[in-house]
Image: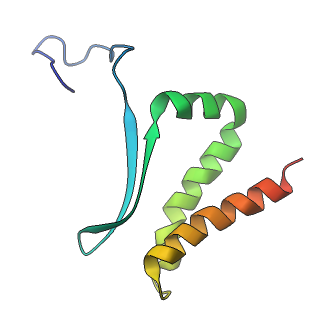
Amino acid sequence: MPNVGMFTASDPVPPETEISIRYTVEVGGLPVYTELYDVRKLASELEVDREGAIEAWTRRLEAPVLARHESEFSAQVTAHIHRGAQIMAATRP
């Protein structure tokens, strides 16, 4: 955390401070797929559709595992992530 002291390191993060989550898939130490998520936006998405948000993170966990033995690895990672999103959208009322 930036600008903390010995007695303030465990304080809550100030509301004006941006918090993000970076999802990166690397091959041989080189990034081939990256997404950056704003925690405020994720919080609102969790409120609206917790199950859908968790399913989206599950796809991100599974995508490189599924793509590992396929040709065009980085393209397959993208496809696994977004194909799952399309399937989810098609099955929702």
Residue at 32% across / 18% down in the picture? 13
Identified at 50% across, 75% down, the residue is: 75
Q: Which residue is painted at 15% across and 19% down in the image?
A: 3
- Image x and y of residue 24, in percent: 37, 58
Q: Is residue 56 above or below residue 72?
A: above
Q: How many marks?
A: 0
Residue 15, horizontal then vertical, whole percent: 39, 14
The way the protein has been coloured in the rendering is: rainbow
Which quadrant would residue 82 be assigned to in this image? bottom right
Q: State whether residue 53 is above or below residue 47.
A: below
Residue 39 against residue 55 in the figure, above or below = above
Residue 48: x %, y % from top left? 70, 31
Position of 35 with respect to 76 (left or right) is left
Taking the spot 76% from the left edge, 62% from the top edge, the residue there is: 87
Occupied quadrant, residue 41: top right
Which residue is nearer to you in this view: 84 or 11? 84
Residue sitting at the far right:
93
**Apparent side of residue 48 relative to residue 36 in the rendered image (left or right):** right
Q: Report the residue that reaches farthest toward the top.
A: 7
* On-image quarter of the N terminus: top left
